[in-house]
Amino acid sequence: MARTYNILIVDDEQSVVFLLKEELSELDKYEVATAYDGAEAINVLQSQPFDVVLLDVKMPRLSGIEVLKYIREQHPTTIVIMLTNFADVKTAIETMKLGAYDFVSKPYVREELLATIDRALELRRLTIDNKLMEYELNRQGLAREFVGTSPAIVSLIRTAQKIADSTAIVQIQGPSGTGKELVAHLIHNASPRKNRPFVIVNCASIPDALLESELFGHEKGAFTDAYAMKQGLVEVANGGSLFLDEVGDISPMVQPKLLRFLETGEFRRVGGTNAMKVDVRIVSATNKDLQKEVEAGRFREDLLYRLNVVTIRIPPLKERKEDLPLLIEYFLKKKMKGKALKRLSDEALHVMMQYDWPGNVRELEHVIEGAVILSHDDLITAKDITLTASAEMQKAKPAPLAPEGADIISLEEMEKIHIERALRQNNYNRSKTSELLGITPKTLYLKVKKYRIKTPARN
Ligand SMILES: Nc1ncnc2c1ncn2[C@@H]1O[C@H](COP(=O)(O)OP(=O)(O)OP(=O)(O)O)[C@@H](O)[C@H]1O
Ligand SMILES: [Mg+2]
């Protein structure tokens, strides 16, 4: 099994490096690299990201302070612990002002050093979680359980668990709302990488021109708006998994770069010259038929074959209605959060079994949510279930704005109608629409999804 954390030891005293390497390598969780002076350290750092660097202050050629500055600038998520030769408080404080996490004086006490590294790793995890939250809006509380006992689901879960250990690239296919993202989580959580980042990149919500730099990062000055260096998500995901959602939407411009990365594990930041190598498990998802995309000349065939080494297909809900009762119970429990559970009347269940669920499990979850609110006592009856409304919503004919005196609709409803109108006016061009609405394309994307606004298939 791969070791979990990457540590770089930099010191010009060979004996210190040797001893540290021995002690850290003994613990299975650390993969240790070494460098004997500052210049060598930078060379190593240019080819691979590290979680923690143990850095001597005084070294020939390039001092620890210089290396520290380089790391803060180029690898902001790498944590630096300084090694000071004697308790030179002044230098130590100076390095902390420059962004070192802590310092340990030599000769070090083993337990103390290990505890400092542990704390550093915890801090790093938190920093990365925060960074990822920017990308994972509204995702807290994502359920981690894949509910279902139909043969298709049972075999799907078994496959997911079986392949979790390997680094094989997996593609998850299935219509909207079937749980593709959930399966990607499942694979990550069942893998030896579960304590490392799970990074989601939504390829459809990031404008074409930005996707490459979101994925691979960019150097300062790489393009007009690149005021500062930015780490790519592949670097952030190092050691963990990268989930490429809506991968069919990657533009032909970025496809070759992704292909190269998948083939070699190497990438370059935009405007950068060094090839960096990371260890990332790739899972992708799409609700497009990528074979058709290939035929239409929109998707590279070689990239498709890289992505679908292992394929997991999630069938639509209407093909596995035997899962409905269990799913309903699961969502009821989730909505009631420990309060007395509501039940479904036989008739209500019957209505739901008859329905086709075009929006799949996501739609089911919304319907249950609505039914819980509408029902008065602990029995949900057929009249509490609004399937027709949701079916109509999917045809989506925006109502005119409410005239004075008409029923007041909720702000959310209003927002939905407004977005639908703006999209139509702009011929469903998302960048134009988001500009018009004064929101980012990503926000627009998330709102379209949240309100389940139907847009014509994009090409
Ligand atoms: N089998 C399941 N058990 C429990 N929850 C599920 C299941 N399938 C889907 N869900 C829930 O339904 C919602 C939609 O799932 P998810 O976002 O993974 O779908 P998706 O396939 O990625 O959809 P889209 O193509 O629209 O992005 C989520 O809240 C998810 O937790
Ligand atoms: Mg999804």
Image (cartoon, helix red, strand yellow):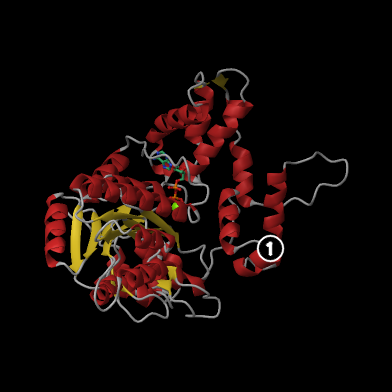
| Residue 434 position within the rendered picture, expressed as x and y whole percent measured from the top left | 64, 64
Q: Is residue 80 left or right of residue 34?
A: right
Q: Does ligand 1 reach within 8 Å of label 1's beta carbon?
A: no
Residue positioned 52% across, 47% down in the render: 138
Give the answer, above or below, for where 221 lies relative to 394.
Answer: below
Residue positioned 15% across, 50% down in the render: 28
Q: List the single residue furthest toward the right.
A: 404
Asked whether residue 240 is in view, the answer is yes
Name the amino acid type tagged 1: Gly
Give the answer, above or below, for where 46 lies relative to 378.
Answer: below
Q: Nearer the viewer, residue 78 or 231?
A: 78
Q: Nearer the viewer, residue 69 or 199?
A: 69
Residue positioned 39% across, 73% down in the render: 299
Q: Nearer the viewer, residue 185 or 315?
A: 185
Q: Nearer the viewer, residue 423 or 18?
A: 18
Pointer 1: what residue? Answer: 438
| Residue 166 position within the rendered picture, expressed as x and y whole percent measured from the top left | 20, 54
Secondary-structure class at tag 1: loop
Q: Is residue 457 left or right of residue 269?
A: right
| Residue 47 position within the rendered picture, expressed as x and y whole percent measured from the top left | 27, 73
